[in-house]
Amino acid sequence: MQAFPQKQIRAHYDARTLRVYQAYSDAIADSALAHGTFVSPPFKLERMTWIKPSFLWMMYRAGWGLKDSGQKRILALDISHEGFAWALANSCPSHPEPGQGKEEWERIKNASPVRIQWDPERNLHLEPLPHRAIQIGLGPEASRRYVEQWIQGITEVTDLAHDIHALVQAGELEEARRRLPEEREYIP
């Protein structure tokens, strides 16, 4: 397996957009697919929403879309590079950096509409890997931009998730890997 830096943004992207993933209930997924973006209700703009460029991290979080926890529908959202750059430029870590005082971090956090969190990337068995995958938490201001400006397209990938999961369960790992979305280093 290829070695990656501890923290590296890896994503499926083209010249216009970068793909992120989210998992939702039927009501939110159906509404988003019908409108080409999230609408309120059922989507709640005032809540933090987490976007993930890593397909396998999303599979870990949503249990391949098989959890009965309101996360059974997996959506692939193609967002503008400008929106992704704005999110990164207006972010702070979700936890204080080593040596950073709690008050300083609270001040920065309260002024930042976006949170960044690095969690262990996952393999096909959803086991943790030594390198990290980025998650980006969008607060209300960022969520509004996401919904109104950044989203360029939405595709449901629940069936793909189920197909890859079935291949993993059958021990057909090479075919499962072949079906994964191509994710490569992304430099904002």
Image (tube, grey):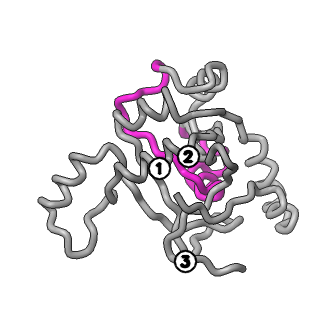
- Residue 60 is situated, as x and y percent measured from the top left of the image, at 60, 57
What's the residue at 59%, 58% (across, down)? 57
Is the residue marked by circle 2 packed among few (<14), some (14-19), or many (20+) residues within 10 Å? some
Badge 3 amino acid: Pro
Badge 2 amino acid: His
Residue 5 bears which disc, if any?
3
SS at circle 1? helix
Give the residues drawn in magenta, as a range.
40-69
Badge 1 amino acid: Ala
* Nearest the eye: 127 or 121: 121
Left or right, 132 with respect to 21, comes to: left
- Residue 97 is situated, as x and y percent measured from the top left of the image, at 27, 69
Residue 81 bears which disc, if any?
2
Please report contact status of discs 1 and 2: CB closer than 8 Å, yes or no.
yes
User: Which comes before the other along the chain, label 1 or label 3?
Assistant: 3
Q: Which residue is mark 1?
A: 85
